[in-house]
Image (tube, rainbow, N blue to C red):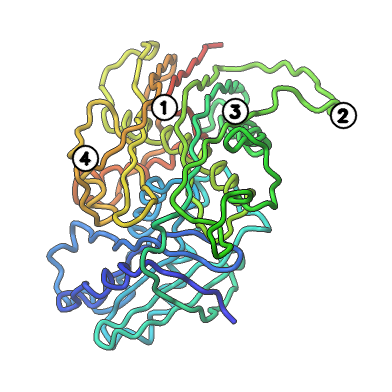
């Protein structure tokens, strides 16, 4: 028996609303949450058409070979930034005309593995043996409305398709639980002279990986209490007259305690290292994760929050460097010290759900730009009153004896043009390959580079 996918009912209507008269197919992403027993799909969003395809006719997109893997993975990377802890890109959907039905599964499989590989490269964490590694593909015939749902094990490159159940449910995430916390970041990463020619990402990855281990190994107080990992998150709460726990949307306050010293059985050895500079990361980060309300375990809720902490630090660092690249000032002095504000996190609700999506906003960006971003990447209209901007400390300074182009050196030409400023970030992220995705730095807070000459 294959996996079961419980799907928000509104997604069914969303998929049926696409018109295939002009194009032979429409593809997009499925977003949701995995659990040991079943998976939940709370959102679907089409991949926006490329600028050079806006005027394409149906005849110019008659083959699935035209399905753009690079464009889809770039879209998936951007959407991943907009997902709080607990949510991830679960899979790919495609709506085709009947004549393309024979080739669709091969195309979906290729896209699914490409998307997962691209997203995984930017993470500070890896899937564990307890994680669900199945991802879903959904094929919808535009004429018959027939649905074919299959899964692949993305940890197995030779994985074959397995059938899966696709079931709709109204109000699926209307009472999901949320975990909120604010964490302070203070990381010092020395940059060795022996690796001076490496890109910033490679130079800082080890230091940030050590910080990530602190987050992974931290103690998490939920509403001021330490709870056993295998306990239910809602254990001890009041039950209804029928004996069931009363389920409503709830928010848990979480505090993170990280270890300052090594365990007594670990020997510490001082190391002298010749460095060309250092990276100092300081700041305050607002983190949020969501978990389904079907008897969730403490360990699953905590894991979702841990991954949000790592993701949001990484994403903001990457966004900062993208912004520096786009707004590079010619003739800037090599040793000039710069101050930058890191982006604030902005939360936006999903209609009919207790779950919120997120984006990042610099101080000089208008709310209209955030609205355009949601429309472009998630195909959703967002009202100004829906925006919830997190209050965070966000100052950043860069002091370098290196040229700006030496810091941001992982760019290359020939990338696809984007529809608007919102997707312009897609191109930069894609071109960058840049040091921050893994390096993940600072978060809504102080960020400084210090490079010293020999």
Question: SS at mark 4?
Answer: helix
The residues bearing labels 3 and 2 have C-alpha atoms spaced at a distance of 31 Å
Name which residue lies at 57% across and 51% down. 238
Does 366 sit above or below residue 449?
below
Residue designated by label 4: 385
Query: Badge 4 local density, few (<14 within 10 Å), some, or many (20+)?
Result: few
Q: Residue 444 has which mark?
A: 1
Question: SS at mark 3?
Answer: helix
Q: Earlier in the sequence, mark 4 or mark 3?
A: 3
How many numbered tags mark residues here? 4
The residues bearing labels 1 and 3 have C-alpha atoms spaced at a distance of 28 Å
The residue furthest front is 241
Residue designated by label 2: 265
Name which residue lies at 53% across and 25% down. 185
Q: Earlier in the sequence, mark 4 or mark 2?
A: 2
Q: Residue 430, can we see it?
A: no
Q: Earlier in the sequence, mark 4 or mark 1?
A: 4
Please tell me which residue lies in front, 349 or 202.
349
Residue designated by label 3: 195
Please tell me which residue lies in front, 119 or 146.
146
The mark lying in front, picked from 4 and 1, is 4
Please tell me which residue lies in front, 44 or 93.
44
Q: Earlier in the sequence, mark 1 or mark 3?
A: 3
Percent from the top left, x then y, of residue 254?
55, 35
Query: Badge 1 local density, few (<14 within 10 Å), some, or many (20+)?
Result: many
The mark lying in front, picked from 4 and 2, is 4
Marks 4/2 in contact by CB < 8 Å: the verdict is: no
């Amino acid at each position: 028996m294959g996996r079961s996918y419980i799907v928000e009912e509104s997604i069914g209507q969303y998929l049926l609303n696409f018109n295939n008269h002009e194009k032979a197919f429409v593809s997009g992403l499925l977003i949701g949450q995995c659990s040991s027993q079943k998976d939940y799909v709370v959102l679907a969003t089409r991949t926006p058409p490329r600028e050079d395809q806006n005027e394409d006719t149906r005849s110019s997109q008659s083959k699935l070979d035209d399905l753009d893997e690079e464009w889809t993975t770039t879209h998936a990377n951007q959407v991943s930034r907009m997902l709080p802890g607990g949510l991830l890109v679960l899979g790919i959907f495609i709506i085709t005309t009947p004549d393309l039905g024979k080739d669709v599964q091969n195309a979906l499989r290729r896209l699914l593995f490409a998307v997962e590989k691209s997203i995984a490269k930017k993470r500070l964490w890896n899937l564990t043996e307890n994680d669900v590694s199945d991802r879903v593909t959904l094929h919808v015939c535009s004429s018959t409305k027939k649905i074919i749902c299959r899964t692949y094990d993305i940890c197995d490159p030779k994985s074959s398709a397995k059938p899966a159940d696709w079931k709709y449910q109204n109000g699926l995430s209307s009472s999901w639980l949320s975990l909120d916390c604010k964490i302070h970041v203070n990381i010092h990463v020395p940059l060795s002279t022996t690796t001076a020619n490496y890109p910033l990402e490679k130079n800082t990855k080890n230091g940030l990986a050590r910080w990530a281990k602190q987050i992974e190994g931290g103690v998490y107080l939920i509403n001021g209490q330490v709870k056993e990992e295998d306990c239910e998150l809602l254990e001890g709460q009041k039950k209804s007259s029928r004996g069931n726990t009363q389920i409503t949307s709830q928010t848990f306050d979480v505090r993170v305690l990280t270890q300052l010293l090594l365990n007594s059985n670990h020997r510490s050895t001082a190391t002298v290292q010749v460095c060309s500079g250092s990276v100092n990361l300081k700041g305050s980060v607002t983190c949020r994760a969501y978990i389904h309300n079907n008897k969730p375990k403490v360990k699953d809720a905590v894991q979702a929050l841990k991954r949000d902490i790592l993701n949001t630090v990484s994403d903001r660092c990457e966004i900062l460097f993208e912004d520096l690249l786009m707004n590079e000032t010619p003739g800037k002095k090599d040793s000039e010290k710069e101050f930058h504000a890191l982006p604030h996190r902005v939360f936006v609700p999903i209609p009919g759900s207790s779950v919120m999506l997120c984006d990042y906003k610099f101080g000089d960006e208008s709310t209209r730009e955030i609205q355009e971003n949601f429309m472009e990447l998630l195909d959703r209209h967002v009202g100004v009153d829906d925006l919830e901007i997190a209050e965070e400390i966000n100052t950043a300074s860069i002091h370098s004896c290196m040229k700006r182009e030496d810091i941001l050196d992982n760019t290359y030409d020939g990338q696809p043009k984007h529809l608007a400023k919102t997707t312009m970030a897609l191109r930069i992220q894609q071109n960058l390959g840049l040091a921050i995705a893994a390096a993940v730095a600072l978060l809504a807070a102080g960020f400084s580079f210090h490079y010293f000459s020999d």
